[in-house]
Image (cartoon, coloured by chain):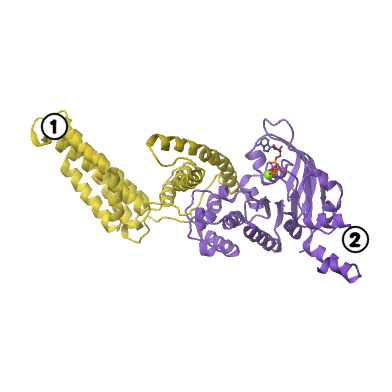
Amino acid sequence: MGDVSTKISIEHLTYKYPFAKNVSLEDITLSIDAGQSIGIIGRNGAGKSTLCYVLSGLIPRFFHGKITGKVTIDGEDVPTMPVEKLIRKVGLVLQNPFSQISGAKMTVYEEVAFGLENLGIEKDEMHERIDTVLRQFDLYKKKDENPFELSGGQLQRLAIASVLVLKPEILILDEPTSQLDPRGTTEVFETISQLKTLGITILIVEHKFEKLVEYVDKIALLHEGKLLGYDTAEHIFSTSEIETYGVGQPIYTALCKRMGLKKANGYYPVSFGETVALLNGLKGSGMDRRTYNG
Amino acid sequence: MKVLSLYVENDTFIHKLEPITKLLYALISIVITFLFPSIMVGAVFVAFSLLLAISAKVFKRMLLLLNVVLIVLLSMVIIQGLFYRQNVTPAFKLWGLTFYKEGLLYSLLLIVRVVNMIISFGVLILTTRPSDLVDNLVQKGLSPRFGYVLASVLQIIPQMLSTTSTITDAQRSRGLETEGNLFQRFSAFFALLGPLVLNSLVEARERAMAIEIRGFSVEGKRTFVRQIPETKADRWIKISLYVAFIVAVVWRIILWVM
Ligand SMILES: Nc1ncnc2c1ncn2[C@@H]1O[C@H](COP(=O)(O)OP(=O)(O)OP(=O)(O)O)[C@@H](O)[C@H]1O
Ligand SMILES: [Mg+2]
């Protein structure tokens, strides 16, 4: 890829839901480069979904309330951008795959067409785009089936396909795997890694850290509406405070912290691969073999 | 999970007609049978509607639909035959009850009207994908919002029925009474309503957000992935229906004035 440019810029964003006592986002400032994938983590009520809604324009269009600060995509103000335009920039996938299908369409094919119909895309282009995403998401064989008859993983892929068919430059996924079994989860993450290669900017809220860290460039840590960290996974999870925010950490990091195993750069490993590499290195350097070989 | 639907997929002439043409036939044939208090007129429409059902190869399904109202139709015969206000001429006696000619004829009139209503709408419903009907109406100027509500109701009712059976199963396995006498089943039904409604409310909000994200509220020209073409046949049928309707109305007014 050529120049790295800022895709999303958030400055001093604060937001309070109508009738809420406290703000749900407080003075958030961060910027995301084009083509990056960002993980958003934080415990329940941290404001992760709320941030997703701001970036996708649901706040303030769907949820009103008081929003201050500046949010821009490609330099353009998000809260005031015309919907037609914003939809072509940002796609949002929600947690429950079942409630994301329009519920008004009788086949997978027509479900994917829903957004294109709303935007008035011409018929030829519509068919072309739908065929492409259905193949991309391995749903082509299911195209004549009723969406309600799909499995959870298939349904979530359908939800992602229905959003991506609008060709957004940014895709936001809010806990896309929380309702899925391990197989469905793998399906979704494989999809995400495909999208990365297409240069799409990705934001993903996810609690399955072991998976998450393999796919994201950076992690944003939210806590009670505030952004407490925005850095690579090893930076975020190596801090000792991480445990006090109640978000947990990858099992591998916890293990290595317990054993006092750090990588050469001074940070703890976060992924399976890194941990294995580290342990293999120790083995080579003559540590107790029985411990690791069994 | 199998989604229930009345629609019978097939490739007949009737299936290929525009949904609106079929809707128009149903509406106009019903209006005409109600305009004329004549068993003959009703019978002609019943016969014609049946012909449509047969040529659309949905005759068997149609019998199932008619079966549902059989009891209602039978009770009409009994009630009108016995108690119709203008009853004077006895027709026959059964178990000591006298049935009258006027009442029986009147019930026959009601029956042909109701049967035509069921068959003509049945042809529409059994041969048309619900979403095609809605798309067709939206193409003809129905508000997309209303169209969406209509389409999702048509989709979600069968869906709710399967959810209902899922929840019924779940509750039965927890010992809730889903069989037994009417009262037991009635209270079981209300116990079921709670989770169903709550579920639907949460889902409704998320669904509203999800369709918002996919441009549902974008103003401007929409396109349709399934454009339903208006064929020559559609145009001719519609013109004939309008003519039949006007003739019927005029004729009725003349009869009424004379
Ligand atoms: N519609 C709403 N009205 C008022 N307050 C809300 C609304 N939605 C969320 N909140 C509040 O805003 C805060 C942040 O909520 P948010 O849903 O963004 O959290 P989250 O990080 O996504 O949590 P979770 O992990 O449970 O999804 C919470 O305190 C929540 O109670
Ligand atoms: Mg959330």
**Which quarter shows the C terminus of chain A?**
bottom right
- Tell me which corner region of the image, top left, top right, bottom left or bottom right, holds residue B32: top left
**Chain under label 2?**
A
Question: x, y percentage for residue B40?
Answer: 16, 44
Question: x, y percentage for residue A225?
Answer: 76, 40
A228 sits to left or right of A127: right
Q: Amino acid at mark 2?
A: Asn
A92 sits to left or right of A107: right
Please report the residue visible at 38 percent of the width from the left and 58 percent of the height from the top: B9
Q: Is residue A155 above or below residue B156?
A: below
Question: x, y percentage for residue A150?
Answer: 53, 56
Secondary structure found at label 2: loop
In this view, the mark in front (1 or 2) = 2
Q: CA distance from mark 1 to mark 2?
A: 104 Å
Q: Residues within 10 Å of mark 1 (few under 14, many from 20)?
A: few
A195 sits to left or right of A275: left
Q: Most extreme residue toward the bottom, as rendered?
A: A284
The residue pinned by badge 2 equals: A265
Rendered shade, chain A: purple
Question: x, y percentage for residue A126?
Answer: 54, 59
Q: Residues within 10 Å of mark 2 (few under 14, many from 20)?
A: few
**Which quarter shows the N terminus of chain A?**
bottom right
Q: Amino acid at mark 1?
A: Met
